[in-house]
Amino acid sequence: MIDVKLKTSPPPTVDENDRRTKAKCLHILNFSKPHGRTFHVAWFSFMIAFTSWYSIAPLKPYIKSDLNLNSEIATSDILAVSANVIFLVTAGLLCDVIGPRRVMATFLLAGSIPVALASLIHNADGLYAIRFFIGVLGACFVPCQFYTTQMYEKNVVGSANAFAGGWGNLGGGFAYILMPLVFNAINSSVNDTNISWRLAMIIPAGLCIIAGLMNIFLADDCPAGDWLKQKKSLENVEVKEVLEASDKMKIDAYVENSEQFESTKKGKFTELSRAFSNPYVLIMMMQYACTFGVELAIDNVIGTFFITQFGLANTSGNFIGAVFGLMNLFSRATGGIVSDYANKKFGIRGRLLSQVSVLLLEGIFLIIFRFSINSLTSAIVVMIFFSFFTQAGCGTTYSIAPYIDPPIYGTIAGLIGTGGTLGGLMFNSIFAHFRSSIPEGFLVTGIIVTVLSLTTFLLKVSGEKIIPIKRLK
């Protein structure tokens, strides 16, 4: 049984007098410091960042009309995703050095500037620049995952990462609810669509500022508190003082934190090289491209697919397509929970088995979707299945990530997230190539995911593979 509970009291396995201790249970309704409050700040901050990152998308028709744009809109979409690659890697490096709290707050506050300045653009070049720099908000995923990895023990970290990441991803759907409501409210007063969409952009900018301040005043970098202060204290503490601790968990936590803080003394480019030279990191990047990357691409085409394939009205087609994104409410978290359960039963091999199973099923249902479009009902049912496994795969992927090279987890988390963004670019290109026959895009995507799911058999994490080496002799 996985220790994910709806409970308001502090986790009983946490020593409240020793803030170095990670929580062994994820209590969803716990808002106390440091674990519960930081968990909720983490996912809420990422949700606001994601909402603001996608805030322009629902307003595209008005922006296109106001600025007299055509293909430039699609180009700005590519720039928004492409820029995120740079910021993701940067976020990972910074989290290892200064901790997630400062990174999350900085990115949110910095991202609020281009979001607000979007209201002042007057041509395509201005839109390009704004969307590029708004891409910094997508990188808030890294400190979100770094937060939960620091706060929760390995037996439940997969669930914590998956819940935080999945609820954060809801921001993509929330943007499509929030921005039209704000636009309509403003337009009902000023009766000018050009002014209304510009004023509407002030709202997500303000939300970014609020979320940034929440990180500064409410969250903790890790159970011990401030990252830099903990780093300094660990540098000064003597080993004999740690060995005198009566609780073995304190020693374990000290060793784990010491290893991670020790890594910050080394050059960050050396760590980046170390991560890039690790073949298992590259495999995880490809697999995250097959989960989050696929999600990004399908978000752009699923509504259009239902509208064109079945002749639905725009509202009806987009509502059905929205189900794909709304599955994040539980699907990504389910992937983390399954991975944690498998880890409890079979160790790290259980996490690897969960990974290959979820990815393989994702690919299979994407392929089936190509041949299930004869009726609206069958298409919706199959979409629900492939959306579930696509998003659950994000959860299983980041349940494995903390085990690959723990001292440089922040860097690795950033690189894996980058893989997802690159996957988004790749699969968007595939769907663009098949724009006159979107179902074929699903078929090709499914084949790619199915093939790459098998790369899980090449992974070696914490000295373990899916098939023990001794069995191969």
Image (spheres, grey):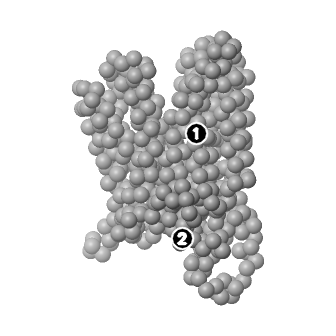
The residue carrying pointer 2 sits among few (fewer than 14), some (14 to 19) or many (20 or more) residues within 10 Å by Cα, namely: few
Residue at image x 69%, y 13%?
Answer: 190
Q: Quadrant of residue 218?
A: bottom right
Q: Which mark, residue 12?
A: 2
Residue at image x 45%, y 70%?
Answer: 462
Query: Relative to the observer, which residue lies in front, 418 or 185?
Result: 185
Q: Amino acid at mark 2?
A: Pro
Q: In the displayed structure, does residue 19 sit left or right of residue 323? A: right
The C terminus lies in quadrant? bottom left
Q: Are marks 2 and 1 in contact (CB under 8 Å)?
A: no
Q: Secondary structure at mark 1?
A: helix
Q: In the displayed structure, does residue 369 sit left or right of residue 93? A: left
Q: Amino acid at mark 1?
A: Phe
Residue 385: image x %, image y %? 32, 41
Residue 296: image x %, image y %? 47, 37
Residue 140: image x %, image y %? 61, 46
For residue 204, say whether it is visible. Answer: yes
Residue at image x 63%, y 21%?
Answer: 185
- Is 124 situated above or below 335? above
Residue 11: image x %, image y %? 54, 67
For residue 153, say whether it is visible. Answer: no
Q: Quadrant of residue 244?
A: bottom right
The N terminus lies in quadrant? bottom left
Q: Which mark, residue 50?
A: 1
